Structure formats: structure tokens, C-alpha cells
Image (cartoon, grey):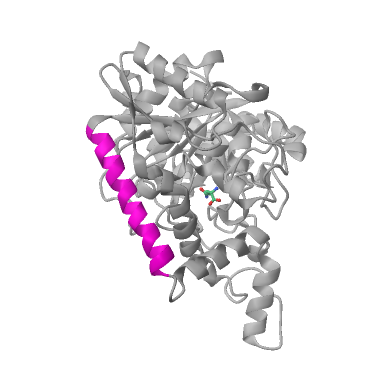
């Protein structure tokens, strides 16, 4: 055992003090976050106080919970009571949420120690964390490269050893793609299985919160803490979460695994990435799974449908930033001018692009041709996956077509950037779970992630596959 599970076990038994654990992680942050920029805000004093409270409970004979004393980074689009929550946007400048996100409450109740608010692409729109108002995050595996995005800060925090666990959000790949690029495990749970209450909305029909960790088992530990019904989120599933940690080691003998043709051969997939997926499939076969190729034809339209549906929902969700209710205000002679000046100064270029795309896709005259058509494509994707899951228990593909790319490589070409998400988007459209597991290296020795997908609420199967892949990964899996 190592990582989060080891820390929690040691703190619960009294062998190690949560305060010492947090000091060690704060030291690492102080030493290297100047370079990495994983955090918008480090919560050093709060973390020390939380750790002391955990230690006091242990001393009193209480059990602080399954995450006792484990440092955790929180993506800065998760509301934290009284603590600035920025979405890496200027428009929320000075705003402090009046409540904690449900996931923030749940990790705290499990004994975790929040060490900071992690950087992201503004409002989670991007694939490189270059769209942050607070400067980009650097990839700890190669600081001249992006960490991926939008949860680049959360991925980098775990990869750099600033915290063994972090939380991110995934609307089109924002947990899985940065996990792949930073060489850590990242999980997008089934839509509705983790409460979105207190996650600042990007595209509400797609957004999901999920864990980052250095191992599959640590990711399972965190998922089991955050998942489950929540009356504060009307889209939260009423079904109890089936814990994944207890089934992790059940193996894959007899499981049917499909390699998705359209994704393994998608535009721009690097040869080393394709080779890693095929090697992962071979490892599963060697462990007793039945592996075959499968066609999921409509996933090739996923990217186009997503870049209509997500901006459409975003244009509606972001209408609330009007200079009155939250954060920044730039005054003007009348209300409309104040609204316009505030939004012009507060939003960065990618957010403006999405609002314009979404507003256009929803406008009278274009609604049927764009938004309506995209929704039909979404239905086709759901049907194609249903057909595939009639034959297969889990599906495999690349997570990202490429390894981590240099800063600026795609920043001026939105389409090239959007193509980073070609393999991850289809499962968001379907609402299914998917996760990225490190599996060897590609160009320049940088980490490659293999994506494991499963049908809705089939996280237990997905994690069993991931666990076997981690054990079989060249060089021993996660960073
Ligand atoms: N990169 C995708 C986008 O820019 C996905 C982002 C996300 O999952 N939040 O929309």
C-alpha cells in the first residue's frame, strides 16, 4: 500500500500525525509550485488547522474517516465556504461562496485535508490550462509542456506530489486528458453518481466531478467517498453508490473488452499512443479477458455535437455573470453598458468564443440546424454505445491522441485544441463512466494514458479492468 490509503491507515492508527503529513506536502508545494503553478490559492493555515483537528480526533479515540489526514487539492470551480473560488476567471474576482460544494463537504467529513484551490482553464473551457487568468500550469513531467486541461492544476498537483489526491471536473475530458498527460489516474464517473451541487456550471448535462490519484486503488477510495445521492442536485441519481474499492482485485477473467475502432484510429492519434492501447488490450487478454475490436460508428460525430451542445449550455449558464450578483463590476452610464463592460473585462477570449458559439447555435433560425441536430447525434451515440455494451463489458481507447504538447502549440488554433478531446467526449455525451490509466510512455518519454469506458453505473467493472492495466503497465503504472 502507498499513497492516500497508506496515509489514511497510518493516521487512523496513530502511527503518523496528520499535521506532519500536511507539513511535508506544504513544503513540497513551497519548493516547486512557483514553477508548476498548480494552485490559484494554497490553504496552508486552514490545512494545518484541519490536520490538527484530525489528530485531536485520533487522540480522543475517534475515527476521522477513510481519508484521515490525506491532503487533497480542489479544482477552483468547486465552491468552498468563505474561500475565494475563481474558476480561473477575472469575472469572479473577490467572490467568496456562501457554502461548500457537496464533494468538499464529503471529503472533509471523511477526514481529508484541503491544501489548495487548483488552477484550471477559465470556466473549465480548454485542454491545456493555458486559458487561465492566473497563468498556465506546467506539466511536472516536463515543465516545457502543458499539463492538459481543463483540470490541469488538479492533475499537476497529484503528479508533482503536492497532494496524493485531487478533485477535478470533466465535461468533455477535463479529468481524463490531463491525467493522461501528467501520468496519473483520472476518473469521470457516471453522470449523476457524484453530486454537482457547488460545482460552478459549465455545461450542466455533461459536467461531472471525479478523482485524480497516483493509483487506481486511491482513485477508488476517493470515488467511494464522494459518490452517492444528494438532495441538493436534482440530477443526482437516487441509487446508492456501489463501492468500487472492495471489488478492485476481482480480475478480468471472462470479461469481454472491445477496442473502439473509430477512436483508436481517430484523427491525430500518435503511433505510440495507438501501440499503448493495443499493448493494454494484449495485457487484458493475457489476464483472461476476451478482447475484440468493436465499431461504435457515431462517435466520429461526437466532437462536432459536443462543440454545439456544450457552448449552448455554457452561454446560458454564464449569463448570470452580470456585474451585479458575483465578483467583478466595471461601471457604466447605464445598466446594459455596465453589464457589457463587466463581461468584456471579466471573460477571456475562449470563454467569449464559447458564449458566441452557443448563442449562435441556439438562435431562432439556427436552433434546429445546429443545437437540434447535435441533440439527435447525441441520441445516436447513446444507441451505438448501448449496442456495443450488449456484447462487451468494457471498451478501450486512447485517452488523448497525443502526449503532452509544448506551450503555445495549439493555443492559437481552437480546432487543433478541440481535437485533443476526440476520444473522451463520446462518454460525456452518453453519460457513461470512463477513466484514464497510465500505460507506458510515448514520444519524448512522456506518459500515455489508456481510456477504459463502461456502461452507466458499471464503475466496478471499469475499475477491475483499470486495476489489471495498472499492474501490467510498462514501468509500473502511475507516476
Ligand atoms: N476540453 C474540453 C472543452 O474545452 C473539455 C473541457 C472539460 O471537460 N471541462 O470544452
Q: Is residue 470 above or below residue 142?
A: above
Q: Is residue 233 visible?
A: no
Q: Is residue 380 magenta?
A: yes
Answer with left or right where residue 78 lies relative to residue 443: left
> Looking at the magenta stretch, what is its main secondary structure?
helix
Q: Is residue 98 above or below residue 377?
A: below
Q: Which residues are magenta?
A: 367-390
Q: Position of residue 228 (x, y in %)?
A: 33, 45
Asked whether 326 or 97 is in front, the reply is 326
**Image quarter (top left, top right, bottom left or bottom right) of the C terminus:** top right
Answer with left or right where residue 20 lies relative to residue 225: right
Q: Quadrant of residue 264?
A: top left
Q: Is residue 68 above or below residue 3?
A: below
Which residue is at 53% across, 14% downward? 474
Q: Quadrant of residue 435?
A: top left
Q: Is residue 247 above or below residue 282?
A: below
Which residue is at 62% across, 55% downward? 122
Q: Position of residue 41 (x, y in %)?
A: 67, 48
Residue farthest to the left, as pictured: 390
Asked whether 272 or 132 is in front, the reply is 272
Asked whether 9 or 374 is in front, the reply is 374
Residue farthest to the top, as pictured: 286
Which residue is at 38% across, 32% downward? 260
Answer with left or right where residue 288 lies relative to residue 398: left
Q: Is residue 195 visible?
A: yes
Q: Position of residue 441 (x, y in %)?
A: 59, 21
Q: Position of residue 311 (x, y in %)?
A: 50, 61
Which residue is at 59% across, 37% downward? 155
Amino acid at each position: 500500500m502507498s499513497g492516500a490509503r497508506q496515509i489514511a491507515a497510518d493516521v487512523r492508527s496513530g502511527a503518523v500525525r496528520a499535521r506532519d503529513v500536511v507539513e511535508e506536502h506544504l513544503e513540497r508545494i513551497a519548493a516547486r509550485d512557483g514553477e508548476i503553478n498548480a494552485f490559484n490559492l494554497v490553504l496552508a493555515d486552514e490545512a494545518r488547522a484541519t490536520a490538527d483537528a484530525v489528530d485531536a480526533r485520533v487522540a480522543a479515540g475517534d475515527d476521522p474517516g477513510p481519508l484521515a489526514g490525506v491532503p487533497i487539492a480542489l479544482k477552483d470551480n468547486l465552491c468552498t465556504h468563505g474561500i475565494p473560488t475563481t474558476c480561473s476567471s477575472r469575472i469572479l474576482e473577490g467572490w467568496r461562496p456562501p457554502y461548500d460544494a457537496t464533494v468538499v463537504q464529503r471529503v472533509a467529513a471523511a477526514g481529508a485535508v484541503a491544501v489548495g484551490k487548483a488552477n484550471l482553464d477559465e470556466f473549465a473551457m480548454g485542454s491545456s490550462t493555458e486559458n487561465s487568468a492566473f497563468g498556465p500550469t506546467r506539466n511536472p513531467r516536463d515543465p516545457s509542456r502543458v499539463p492538459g486541461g481543463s483540470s490541469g492544476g488538479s492533475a499537476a498537483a497529484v503528479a508533482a506530489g503536492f497532494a496524493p489526491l485531487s478533485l477535478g471536473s470533466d465535461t468533455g475530458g477535463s479529468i481524463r486528458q490531463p491525467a493522461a498527460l501528467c501520468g496519473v489516474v483520472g476518473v469521470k464517473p457516471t453522470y449523476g453518481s457524484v453530486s454537482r451541487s457547488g460545482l460552478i456550471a459549465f455545461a450542466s448535462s455533461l459536467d461531472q466531478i471525479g478523482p485524480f490519484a497516483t493509483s487506481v486503488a486511491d482513485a477508488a477510495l476517493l470515488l467511494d467517498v464522494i459518490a452517492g445521492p444528494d438532495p441538493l442536485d436534482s440530477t443526482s441519481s437516487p441509487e446508492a453508490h456501489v463501492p468500487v474499492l472492495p471489488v478492485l482485485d476481482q480480475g478480468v477473467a471472462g470479461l469481454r473488452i472491445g477496442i473502439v475502432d473509430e477512436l483508436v484510429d481517430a484523427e491525430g492519434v500518435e503511433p505510440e499512443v495507438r501501440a499503448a492501447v493495443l499493448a493494454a488490450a494484449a495485457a487484458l487478454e493475457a489476464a483472461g479477458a476476451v478482447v475484440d475490436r468493436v465499431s461504435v460508428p457515431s462517435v466520429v460525430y461526437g466532437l462536432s455535437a459536443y462543440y454545439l451542445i456544450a457552448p449552448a449550455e455554457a452561454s446560458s449558464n454564464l449569463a448570470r455573470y452580470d456585474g451585479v450578483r458575483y465578483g467583478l463590476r466595471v461601471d457604466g452610464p447605464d445598466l446594459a453598458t455596465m453589464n457589457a463592460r463587466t463581461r468584456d473585462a471579466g471573460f477571456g477570449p475562449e470563454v467569449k468564443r464559447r458564449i458566441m458559439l452557443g448563442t449562435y447555435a441556439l438562435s431562432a433560425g439556427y436552433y434546429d440546424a445546429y443545437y437540434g441536430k447535435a441533440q439527435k447525434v447525441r441520441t445516436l451515440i447513446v444507441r451505438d454505445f448501448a449496442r456495443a455494451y450488449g456484447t462487451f463489458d468494457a471498451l478501450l481507447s486512447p485517452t488523448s491522441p497525443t502526449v503532452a504538447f509544448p506551450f503555445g502549440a495549439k493555443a492559437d488554433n481552437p480546432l487543433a485544441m478541440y481535437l485533443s478531446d476526440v476520444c473522451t467526449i463520446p462518454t460525456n455525451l452518453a453519460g457513461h463512466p470512463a477513466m484514464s490509466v497510465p500505460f507506458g510512455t510515448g514520444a519524448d518519454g512522456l506518459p500515455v494514458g489508456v481510456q477504459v469506458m463502461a456502461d452507466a453505473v458499471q464503475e466496478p467493472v471499469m475499475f477491475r479492468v483499470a486495476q489489471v492495466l495498472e499492474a501490467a503497465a510498462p514501468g509500473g503504472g502511475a507516476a
